[in-house]
Each structure stands twice: as structure tokens, then as C-alpha cells.
């Protein structure tokens, strides 16, 4: 039994044993009332043999539960801010008082419930408080997730910290086991597990470590934004990288060449699985390491679920269901694949014959009821002619602008009234429109064919658990595009109060725990701010005469179209994101 609980139990026994001996002795002298014994009343029969057995059972049960609570407090009490001495004292006093009641109350069955309650209630209260403290700290929840029951009190160094089960890289089970053993022998294996916990609890997509001669600078990307990690000294960083490379099946001694490997892990009790890809490469200052979280393919969402307003979705789908060229665009790595697939799923693929002409290896366009034909660059023209013989109603051509058959496809759109969908990388719908126009060999043909262009930017969603209302003046609401009389509350991300408000009545600093949902970042997940340009005859004429971004923007404003920035502020007005986040995303790129 752990040493801190021994004094408490010993003190309890000092009181209990003499009392038990005294009352056992009294069993030999039954109380007399007149000439008759009075069985069942007084100390003479309180501790009959079977009653002593009942008391002993509950006493041993209490000892077992107290031992678990004590060991749990010694291991996690500091993190949960629960004092072992205080809880052990409360536990012992409760049981001691209940035992004294059993000794003092003449009717055994009347006092027994107190003993039963004292055996369980302190433990139940502790577990309730413990559960609440764990719920407030997601990282602590992951650390305890392996369970404290059954854990050795003197674990090996590599078994300290979070209890994880790793799947190391390797071509055979023996090789995987060897790589895992080498990783576990690393001096920073515990710090490696802490880094993985940080990655998963913060939903990081990528962790980057930059090694220099003296230290290791780390940062993690969460929802497209970088957040700094505490720096590591070079010795700890090297030991951590040794274990990482062993898990990924890489050569730990090669610090110059690029290496790529993968490994997986899971928590036994939570059945939480995660897979990572490790990329390392030597750089002039040392070494650069990237740890990427490999996520399973997510379920396709509707355009509205991705962030498109219902009326905009209706306009885009209408354009896709009619003859014409529709362009879907987004900046690199900002959800273009998700929007592309959702747009294809939204259009009519049941009553129309839709064929996807995609380069070999592209799986992003493979959706239900879209017939896929793959092509190689040298056989593109041949594959396209075979596709025309099928007489499709709509053609899905992801990389049309990069091929030499653009005019042929546009001719089909204009003369044969076909629907064609293409995608491109651009920061806005206007930018995508002008870039596609510049690539088209026949500008007039392109202007006749194009009917709609969508664009998007991703902004982070505010955490609903910790977002704070933002008081704005009526004129500020108007600038955002809202009506001060009807606009709902505008929110911003959680911000700590000023230092003078973070003290208690005695002037002592108050620790404000981070939000358990977003880990103190203030945002969780992202949503797209879409814009949609519908091309009319006036815009076609402008594209052929003066295709400048300023002229096109002015024309669109003249007909009442909202820009992509204004669409993003609509998300602010409904409490989905913040003004600061929109300004960050739409800030002009820094020079250099």
C-alpha cells in the first residue's frame, strides 16, 4: 500500500481495534434485565460472528477502493489540482466515524447503512470530481486514457507518459517489432508521445521542426494557420527525431538526404487511431522535419454545408444544368477538391449523360453517375474523339485549360449546346475568369461559352464554446453589410481579460484554463466564403474589350454583386467567424 495512505489507515486501526476487543469481551457478559437476558439489545450481541464478518467485508472493500484512489491521486493529483493528503484524510475520517456509529448504536442493522455509505460515497464523490477535472482538460484526458488501473508503480522510462500502441514501419512483423524497439529505446520517447498528443488534441494537420546547431524550433498548422510550439534543446530534439525515424522505418544516422516514411498509433481504451507521414531532409542550417497527419477520406458534404449560401448554390447548380462552360476555382490547398466534388454531386447526373475526361491517376472526379475516361497527354485527342462519339450531355474536364484541345471543346459548348465543367486555382471568381480567358486560344469563343465562375477562400470557424460577443457601433455593422436594427450579435475569438482582472480577492493571479474544445486557439474547423460570377452579355462584351480586374469588379458592383470579401463578412454577421479572421485571410500578401 502506498506510503501516504499507511498513516491514515494505521490511525484508524488504533481506534478500531481496542473498541472491537472491548465489545467482543462484552459478548461474554450478556446484559440482564431482572432475571432474563435481553438478547438483541446492547453491546452483548452487536458483534456476533456473522456481523463481524459483514463489517470485515466492507472494511476490506473500503481499503481496496482507498488504495486505488490514493494511487490515482499520487499519479494524477497534481495535474487535476487535487491534493492526495486532503482526500485521504476525508476518506479515512468518513469511514472511521461510520465504524464508531456501528460500535455505539445498539441496533446493528440501523447503523450498518452508515458503514456501507462510508465505504462507497467518498470514492463516488472523488470519481465525480475527477471526471469533471478531466473533462476540462482534453490533453489530460488523453494522458489518462490508458487508465491508471493495473499500471506498475515503477514503469520503465519508455512506458511513462501516455499509454500508446504504435505500429512501426516495416516489410514484416519482425522488422516492425525491431523498429518499435529501437524507437522505444530513444532517450526522448516520452517527449515524442507528448508531441503526438499535442498534434492530435489540437487537430494539427502538420508539425514542422527546424533543426539548427543549438536548438529545434517547432510549429504546428491547425486549420491552415501556424502556431508555435515550445522550443527544444538540440540534445532532446535529436533524441526525439531518432525515435521518430525508427518508427517510420528511416535511417536515423542520415541527416542529409530526403527520407519519407509512415507509422500509426492508437490508444487501447479509446480505440482512437492516427496515422502519420514523416518527411525529413537536410538543409544548410541542419535538418527540416515535417510530420503530417494522414486523415481518412471525409464524407462528401453539400455546397451549403461547405459554406455556400442556399441562393448561390441554386444559381450555380442551375448554370451547371444548362449548356455552357462553368468554372470552379479556389486557391491552392483551400478546399478546391471538396467544392469540386460537391458541385458535381449537386448537378443533374440522372437524366443527363455525364462523362468525366480526367488524366490518369486523378480520383477526385470519380463520383456516382459520372462515367470516367482517363487519358494520357499523347492520346488526349484520340480519347476526346471517342468521347464525342458517345454524345454526352455534359463533359467534366478538370484540366481543360492546360490542354491543346480547348478550342475543340469550346466549339462543342457553343454549337452543340454541351455543358462543360472545369476547375482552376485562383484567389477569386474574377481572378479565375480572367486567368482562364488569358489561357484560351480563341477569346471570343471562350466569352461565348462561359456562363458561371465560382471562387472561394477558407476562414476559420469560431469556437462556439468560448467565442465572445463583440460590441460594434451601428456604422460598423453597416460597413459589414448588415442592418444595425436586425443584425444578430457579432462575435470574436476568446481573449484573456487584462492582467488586473486575472487576480482573486487577495490579489493572487488566477489561472484561466484553455477552452477544452479548441485548446485555447479560439477557432475550430474552417468554412468557405464563396463568390459566384454569372456571365451575361454585358460582361462578355467587357471581357473582349477591356479584360481588367478593376473594370470587371466595377461592372459587377454596378449590378449589385457582392465581392468575395463582402460574402465573408456575411459569415461574420451570422456569428460563424470573426472580423479579425476575415482581415487575416484577405490581407494582401507580404512583399518578398
Image: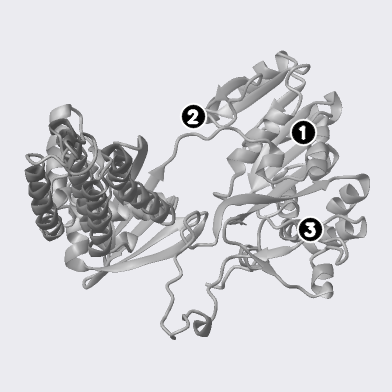
Counting from the top left corner in percent of width and height, residue 119 is at: 27, 44
**Circle nearer the N terminus (3, 2):** 2
Answer above or below: position of 558 versus 330.
below
Left or right position of 257 against 418: left
Pick out the residue farthest to the front: 34
Q: Which mark is residue 333?
A: none
For the point 83% across and 29% down, which residue is it? 323
Element type at marker 3? Answer: loop
- Reading the image, the residue beneath label 2 is 361
Pick out the residue farthest to the top: 390
- Reading the image, the residue beneath label 3 is 563
- Reading the image, the residue beneath label 1 is 410
Label 3 – label 1 distance at C-alpha: 28 Å
For the point 78% across and 60% down, which residue is it? 488
Residue in front for this viewpoint, 317 or 273:
273
Mark 3 neighbour class, 10 Å CA radius: few under 14, some 14 to 19, many 20 or more: some
Asked whether the beta carbons under mark 3 and mark 2 sit within 8 Å of each other, the answer is no
Answer above or below: position of 416 versus 232.
above
Element type at marker 1? Answer: helix
Counting from the top left corner in percent of width and height, residue 230 is at: 33, 68
For the point 36% across and 40% down, which residue is it? 274
Left or right position of 535 against 107: right
Would residue 476 be seen by someone viewing this image from the given angle? yes
Residue in front for this viewpoint, 576 or 27:
27
Label 3 – label 2 distance at C-alpha: 35 Å
Left or right position of 462 against 565: left
Counting from the top left corner in percent of width and height, residue 214 is at: 22, 73
Amino acid at each position: 500500500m502506498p506510503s501516504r495512505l499507511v498513516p491514515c489507515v494505521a490511525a484508524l486501526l488504533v481506534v478500531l481495534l481496542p473498541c472491537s476487543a472491548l465489545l467482543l469481551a462484552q459478548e461474554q457478559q450478556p446484559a440482564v434485565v431482572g432475571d432474563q437476558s435481553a438478547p438483541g439489545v446492547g453491546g452483548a450481541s452487536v458483534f456476533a460472528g456473522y456481523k463481524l464478518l459483514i463489517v470485515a467485508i466492507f472494511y476490506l472493500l473500503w481499503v481496496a477502493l482507498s488504495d486505488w484512489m490514493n494511487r490515482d491521486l499520487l499519479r494524477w493529483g497534481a495535474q487535476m489540482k487535487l491534493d492526495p493528503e486532503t482526500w485521504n484524510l476525508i476518506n479515512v475520517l468518513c469511514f472511521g466515524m461510520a465504524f464508531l456509529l456501528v460500535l455505539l448504536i445498539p441496533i446493528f442493522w440501523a447503523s450498518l447503512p452508515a458503514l456501507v455509505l462510508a465505504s462507497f460515497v467518498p470514492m463516488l464523490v472523488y470519481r465525480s470530481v475527477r471526471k469533471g477535472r478531466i473533462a476540462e482538460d482534453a490533453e489530460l484526458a488523453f494522458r489518462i486514457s490508458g487508465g491508471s488501473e493495473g499500471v506498475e508503480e515503477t514503469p520503465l522510462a519508455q512506458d511513462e507518459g501516455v499509454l500508446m500502441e504504435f505500429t512501426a514501419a516495416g516489410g514484416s512483423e519482425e522488422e516492425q517489432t525491431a523498429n518499435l524497439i529501437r524507437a522505444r529505446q530513444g532517450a526522448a520517447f516520452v517527449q515524442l508521445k507528448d508531441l503526438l498528443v499535442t498534434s492530435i488534441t489540437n487537430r494539427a494537420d502538420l508539425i514542422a521542426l527546424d533543426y539548427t546547431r543549438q536548438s529545434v524550433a517547432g510549429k504546428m498548422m491547425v486549420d491552415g494557420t501556424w502556431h508555435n510550439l515550445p522550443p527544444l534543446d538540440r540534445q532532446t530534439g535529436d533524441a526525439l527525431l531518432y525515435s521518430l525515424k525508427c518508427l517510420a522505418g528511416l535511417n536515423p544516422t542520415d541527416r542529409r538526404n530526403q527520407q519519407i516514411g509512415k507509422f500509426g498509433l492508437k490508444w487501447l481504451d479509446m480505440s482512437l487511431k492516427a496515422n502519420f507521414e514523416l518527411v525529413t531532409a537536410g538543409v544548410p542550417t541542419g535538418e527540416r522535419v515535417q510530420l503530417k497527419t494522414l486523415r481518412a477520406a471525409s464524407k462528401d458534404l453539400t455546397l451549403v454545408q461547405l459554406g455556400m449560401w442556399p441562393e448561390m448554390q441554386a444559381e450555380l447548380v442551375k448554370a451547371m444544368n444548362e449548356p455552357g462552360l462553368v468554372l470552379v476555382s479556389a486557391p491552392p490547398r483551400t478546399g478546391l477538391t471538396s467544392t469540386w466534388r460537391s458541385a458535381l454531386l449537386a448537378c443533374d447526373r440522372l437524366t443527363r449523360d455525364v462523362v468525366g475526361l480526367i488524366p490518369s491517376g486523378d480520383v477526385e472526379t470519380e463520383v456516382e453517375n459520372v462515367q470516367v475516361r482517363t487519358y494520357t497527354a499523347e492520346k488526349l485527342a484520340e480519347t476526346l474523339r471517342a468521347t464525342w462519339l458517345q454524345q454526352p450531355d455534359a463533359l467534366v474536364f478538370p484540366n481543360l485549360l492546360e490542354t491543346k484541345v480547348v478550342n475543340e471543346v469550346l466549339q462543342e459548348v457553343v454549337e452543340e449546346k454541351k455543358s462543360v465543367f472545369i476547375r482552376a486555382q485562383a484567389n477569386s471568381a474574377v481572378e479565375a475568369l480572367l486567368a482562364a480567358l488569358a489561357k484560351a486560344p480563341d477569346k471570343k469563343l471562350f466569352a461565348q461559352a462561359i456562363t458561371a465562375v465560382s471562387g472561394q477562400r477558407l476562414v476559420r470557424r469560431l469556437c462556439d464554446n468560448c467565442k465572445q460577443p463583440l460590441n460594434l457601433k451601428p456604422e460598423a455593422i453597416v460597413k459589414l453589410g448588415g442592418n444595425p436594427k436586425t443584425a444578430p450579435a457579432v462575435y470574436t475569438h476568446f481573449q484573456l481579460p487584462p492582467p488586473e482582472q486575472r487576480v482573486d480577492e487577495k490579489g493572487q493571479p488566477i489561472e484561466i484554463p484553455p477552452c477544452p474544445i479548441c485548446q485555447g486557439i479560439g477557432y475550430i474547423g474552417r468554412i468557405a466564403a464563396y463568390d459566384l460570377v454569372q456571365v451575361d452579355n454585358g460582361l462578355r462584351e467587357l471581357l473582349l474589350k477591356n479584360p481588367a480586374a478593376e473594370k470587371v469588379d466595377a461592372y459587377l458592383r454596378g449590378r449589385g454583386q457582392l465581392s468575395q470579401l463582402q460574402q465573408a463578412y456575411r459569415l461574420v454577421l451570422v456569428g460563424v467567424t470573426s472580423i479579425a479572421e476575415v482581415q487575416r485571410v484577405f490581407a494582401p500578401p507580404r512583399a518578398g
